[in-house]
Amino acid sequence: MPANASSSTKSAPAPTGGGGRGVRILSTGVGMPSRTLTNADLERLMDTSDEWITQRTGIRTRRIVDHDAGECTLTMATDAARMALERGGVRGADLDFVILATMSPEMLCPPTACRIAARLGAGGRGARAGGAMDLFGACTGYVYGLNIAHDLIKGGSYDRIMVLGGDTLSRLMDYSTAGRGTAIIFGDAGAGALLIADPDPRLGIIAQSMHSDGEGWKEIFVPQEARDFPEGVPPDPAKFGRVQMNGATVFKFAVGTFPNLIQETLDKANLRPEDIDMVISHQSNARILQAARDRFGIPEDKFYINIDRYGNTVAASVPLCLHELVMAGRVKPGMKVMFVAFGAGLTWGSSLWQM
Ligand code: COA
């Protein structure tokens, strides 16, 4: 993606109504943790095997933070934002807004995004200080963030928004045999993209969707106290602060929802599967992704899978895929790219872009 140095200064919010403007994904970045957690490492921590994990999930290795070295959601997402700024030729001070999709912020208060904005030079006390917020959308958070940021720019009030995804699920895992059905899946990462206004009104989102079903909350949750456990599940203090996932139910939800989500988005855009140049999906499980790919007859090179190397990195997974594809020259201006994600909430959403 060509760098487009933005020489203009940060705009004062313009009146809403973006007229004929479009929205462009200018640049991307990642911030990866330093440690690696392989299936062989997990074999030493719990009763599991490389064969079981690979066959059921397609995951071979993940990256996780070195907590003692200070690595965390804040540092990974900040690194990703710095890379995206540098690659886009934009100064942090020129950002209008920073969105961090996450389910593992540093603290519940303040929003981690505010601390990222400060590190980027986007915040401050003056009239030019950019806003910042955390978006709690679990694995769908990044796609929700893309849709929201796009429409804020399209509406004409803002010109440059950094949309980040960062999660440190290793801190919410039980790496013993008791937690093996969940701990094998997740990895840590930060990644993101810089969205900017573009004079070409054809650029940006062609179709989008955002859905939720809160009745399904108990399929993936992080209890903090006894009353957080669903009816019929005995509260267990050892599970406080640890992700509880009903893997088989989530699997069925994902396999059922995923094709509907793709079809709904194609219908809204009046497009066929073959019109899409790349599908960038949240990386939950290789089998779920392959099932959706086969259902629509999408060739392998148009449906990216990198879960084997990173596991499920929650809100970071979609921008991590995007960054890798941009760097490899496989996502370029002119392409139609469909982002799709689903996860805890339950939530699911899509964002189909004319790049
Ligand atoms: N290693 C070895 N055995 C394991 C294991 C592990 N890591 N985890 C679970 N098992 C065992 C179970 O104890 C169970 O044994 P039992 O039959 O003796 O009771 C057996 O394997 C089957 O467990 P189950 O949970 O039904 O496995 P599964 O086939 O559903 O696979 C997941 C588990 C988690 C891989 C799978 O359900 C999945 O991928 N779900 C979707 C998760 C997801 O995408 N989450 C994120 C959403 S954004």
Image: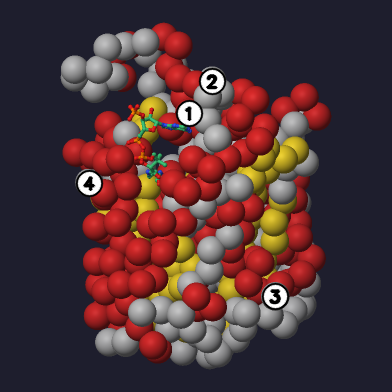
Q: Residues within 10 Å of mark 4 (few under 14, many from 20)?
A: few
Q: Nearer the viewer, mark 1 or mark 4?
A: 1
Q: Tag 2's secondary structure?
A: loop
Q: Of the residues tagged 2 and 4, which is closer to the observer?
A: 2
Q: Is label 1 or label 3 in front?
A: 1
Q: Secondary structure at mark 4?
A: loop
Residue 74 locus on image (x, y percent): 67, 39
C-alpha gap between disc 1 and disc 2:
6 Å
What residue do we see at 48% from left, 28% from top? Answer: 180
Q: Disc 3 designates what residue?
A: 328
Label 3 residue SS: loop
Q: Which mark is residue 76?
A: none
Picture quarter with ligand 1: top left
Residue at horizontal 27 percent and vertical 87 percent from the top: 270
* Pick the front one: 98 or 175: 175
Q: In the image, what residue occupies the spot 19% across and 17% down?
A: 232
* Relative to 255, 74 lies left or right: right
Residue 96, by quadrant, is bottom right
- Residue at 72 percent across and 40 percent down: it is 36
Rounded to the nearest whole Å, what is the CA distance between mark 3 and mark 2? 37 Å
Colour mapping: secondary structure
Asked whether mark 1 lies closer than 8 Å to ligand 1, one says yes
Which is in the foreground here, disc 3 or disc 2? Answer: 2
Pointer 1 with pointer 2, Cβ within 8 A: yes
